[in-house]
Amino acid sequence: MSLYEIIGGLLSIIGASFLFLGGLGIYRMPDVYNRLQAGTKATTLGAMSLILGVGVVKMEDHWSWIVKAIIIIVFIAISNPISSHALSRAMYHRKKFPIIKSSDKNMDAYREVFEKQEREKEEKK
Amino acid sequence: MITGEFYVLPLKTNNYKHMKTLTLSEKLTRFIINWLFLMIVWFAFTTSLSAQELIAGAIATMFISLLTISLFTCCTFKLLSPRSLFYMSYFLVIFLRELIKSNFDVARRVLTPSLPINPGIVKFKTKLPTDFAKMVLANCITLTPGTLTIDVIDDTFYIHWIDVKTTNPEEAFIEIAETFEKILLKIFKP
């Protein structure tokens, strides 16, 4: 076993374990927003680490693998949070409000904005 | 519609109004920076220095950067000064540290049997000047421990927080976004 294979294998194991934790988080959390929280963070670092591991293992054959792996990592880091933001905003506008445990009214600061937008929509009709 | 020398995409939002007021030199700097950036990406994908590949890449990226000149609003030559390059690498280190921290935070919450969460949505205001800087801050907030950006309206961020410590906007700002905003202000307002 070469040094590349050992380092790449370790990175892949770390990435796979974070991806597993992300999947467990999606299973255990109570509503959409908390599931997105667990999913986004764990899959970002998990996929980054896994792809970097593959790049390092393949670097023994040719150095271009690691460059391509880094490009993919940058695209994942940019696109993952944007998709989770779009999903959570769409869920709020479908009236799936987040679970809130305490009775404090200030805990949902987005509700007033949402209700204002809904009123404006009805006035336009 | 055709305005001046370059074709501008007919988008209906107000975000692109400033394009009509840009001078020729500003458009040229944007075009050159986009072209250079796309050439770097092309080179990273092909990883070969043969003349054929480089000429094909130069022609393709030139057309792409001509067509999308109104959509790239981030780039001026100020971003390539040594000072902002230093702050960018510092930003990258802080970002990676926070990303790893947030992963261990998620692992701790998921593996605890009682599921220690106290979710809610808080808001705060930011001082960042441009839309691009706000997008970077929003993405960073999504990847830092326990927070998820739901919406950005003008200067106000709406954040879903998995463990709400305070509903006061100023305290929430200090808790969530202060470290990132300090560095971003130094990068985008030199």
Image (cartoon, rainbow, N blue to C red):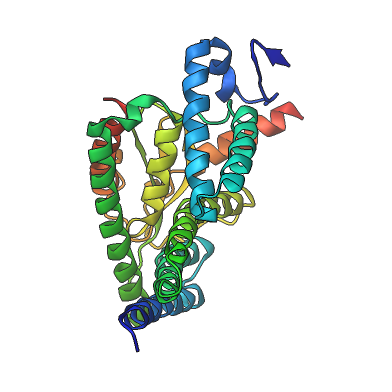
User: Where A97 sits versus B24, above or below?
Assistant: below
**Location of residue A66 by image quarter:** bottom left
In the foreground, A57 or B189:
A57
Q: Residue at x 50, y 73 (%)?
A: A26
User: Where B95 sits versus B158, above or below?
Assistant: below
Which residue extends farthest right? A125
Q: Quadrant of the C terminus of chain B?
A: top left
**Location of residue B143 by image quarter:** bottom left
Q: Residue at x 24, y 42 (%)?
A: B178
User: Where B174 sits versus A43, above or below?
Assistant: above
Q: What x and y, as percent, mark residue B69?
A: 58, 27
**Location of residue B13 by image quarter:** top right
In the foreground, A82 or A45:
A45
Q: What x and y, as percent, mark residue A115?
A: 57, 39
Q: Residue at x 45, y 64 (%)?
A: A34
Q: What x and y, as percent, mark residue A67?
A: 44, 59
Q: Is residue B171 left or right of residue B59?
A: left
Q: Is residue B91 left or right of residue B47?
A: left
Q: Quadrant of the N terminus of chain B?
A: top right
In the foreground, B142 or B171:
B142
User: Where A92 sits versus B17, above or below?
Assistant: below
Q: What x and y, as percent, mark residue B16?
A: 58, 22
Q: Is residue A62 visible?
A: yes
Q: Is residue A84 visible?
A: no
